[in-house]
Image (tube, rainbow, N blue to C red):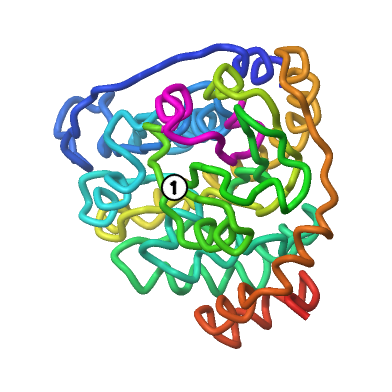
């Protein structure tokens, strides 16, 4: 854990890599891997998703006696999140960890996990994601050329940052120019709160904040820290407005080339690292608050019920219920309780 905390303080920018061939069956000496796979992420190399992924790769290499080698391409080296989603769909990337919010542009139901102010705490999150709702979402993902591992990784509860005014109440969001990922659930949430959301890919975020294209953004504390967004922001409002997770997505055809015993090892170790990474984020969330304060960032507590009341007075929840369908909505409300009424 000390290694992770130390790593979170470093900044590593890795850009410009070109897309390489996908899954290669190597006919080399016995010491060489038989299967080499590419695993892409959008996060900085110091982020727990990448640290824990590397741990899984090491265990996979050992458990398969070197037959499977998985190579990590972090920090959007192979393209933006939307580019990488296309690559894992067409098989030019084997695995890709993607926010459920961004995945919603391809599998709409994925966005239900990040419905505004739906989850109050992590107990509710894991009850839903490791239970009925998570299984329903994976089933929908599986109807496409890709599939999801059984355990979703933690991207944390999202918070709002600002370089201009402090966000304390729903009124403070009116007209506020806010970067959001290209995700319908977040765009509609902030429109319902009368903000001015602007979808921008993550690899363009720092520049957009630095040049004042937008006043603020919203992300979990781990992202705010590892991407050094505090350098171009003044305050963090602890809104916990949505929870977001990373699905580890695989290309079906690529994965099918592995023998079943190797598939089982890959899935087992990635899911094991998912649980480790969840624990990392839970611990880091508290330490990061102190870290950000030390960097001069003003942390602001807000009353979440005020935001929920504003949403309940709009058609926000009713609109999303209609889009997601009765079955998915019932699975969500079994955990979250009634929404929008």
**Visible residue check, residue 48:** yes
Residue 83 vs 144, above or below: the answer is above
Front in this rendered view, residue 138 or 156: 156
Residue visible at 80% across and 20% down in the picture: 290
Viewer-nearest residue: 59 or 307 = 307
Rendered position, 188 above or below 48: below
Rendering coords of residue 212 (x, y %): 46, 28
Above or below 339: residue 59? above
Residue placed under numbered mark 1 in the picture: 198
Q: Quadrant of residue 8?
A: top right
Quadrant showing the N terminus: top right
Kindly identify the residue that appears in the image at 65 percent across and 20 percent down.
Answer: 4
Which residue occupies the foreground of this view, 38 or 7? Answer: 7
Kindly state the secondary structure of the residue where label 1 is placed.
Answer: strand
Q: Which residues are magenta?
A: 205-224
**286 with respect to 225 (left or right):** right
Residue shown at 52% from the left, 44% from the top: 270
Q: Position of residue 90 (x, y in %)?
A: 21, 55
């Amino acid at each position: 854990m000390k290694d992770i905390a130390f790593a979170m303080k470093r900044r590593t920018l890795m850009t410009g890599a070109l897309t390489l061939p996908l899954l290669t069956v190597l006919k080399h000496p016995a010491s060489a891997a038989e299967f080499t796979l590419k695993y892409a992420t959008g996060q900085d190399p110091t982020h727990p998703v990448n640290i824990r992924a590397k741990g899984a790769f090491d265990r996979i290499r050992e458990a398969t006696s070197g037959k499977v080698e998985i190579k990590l391409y972090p920090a959007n080296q192979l393209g933006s999140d939307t580019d990488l989603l296309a690559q894992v769909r067409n098989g030019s990337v084997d695995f890709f960890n993607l926010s459920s919010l961004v995945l919603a542009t391809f599998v709409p139901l994925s966005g239900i996990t990040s419905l505004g102010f739906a989850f109050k705490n992590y107990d509710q999150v894991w009850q839903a994601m490791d239970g009925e709702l998570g299984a329903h979402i994976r089933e929908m993902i599986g109807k496409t050329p890709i599939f999801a591992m059984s355990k979703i990784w933690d991207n944390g509860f999202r918070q709002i940052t600002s370089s201009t005014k402090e966000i304390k109440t729903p009124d403070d969001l009116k007209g506020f120019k806010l970067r959001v990922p290209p995700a319908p659930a977040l765009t509609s949430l902030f429109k319902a709160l009368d903000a001015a959301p602007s979808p921008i890919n993550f690899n363009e975020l720092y520049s957009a904040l630095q040049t004042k294209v937008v006043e603020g953004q919203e992300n979990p504390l781990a992202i705010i820290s590892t991407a050094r967004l505090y350098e171009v922001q003044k305050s963090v409002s602890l809104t916990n407005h949505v929870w977001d997770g990373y699905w580890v997505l695989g290309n079906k055809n690529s994965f099918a080339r592995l023998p079943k015993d190797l598939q089982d090892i890959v899935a087992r170790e990635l899911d094991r690292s998912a649980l480790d990474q969840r624990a990392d984020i839970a611990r880091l969330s508290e330490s990061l608050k102190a870290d950000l304060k030390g960097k001069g960032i003003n942390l602001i507590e807000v009353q979440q019920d005020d935001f929920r009341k504003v949403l309940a007075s709009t058609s926000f929840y009713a609109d999303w219920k209609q889009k997601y369908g009765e079955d998915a909505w019932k699975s969500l409300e079994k955990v979250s309780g009634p929404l929008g009424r």
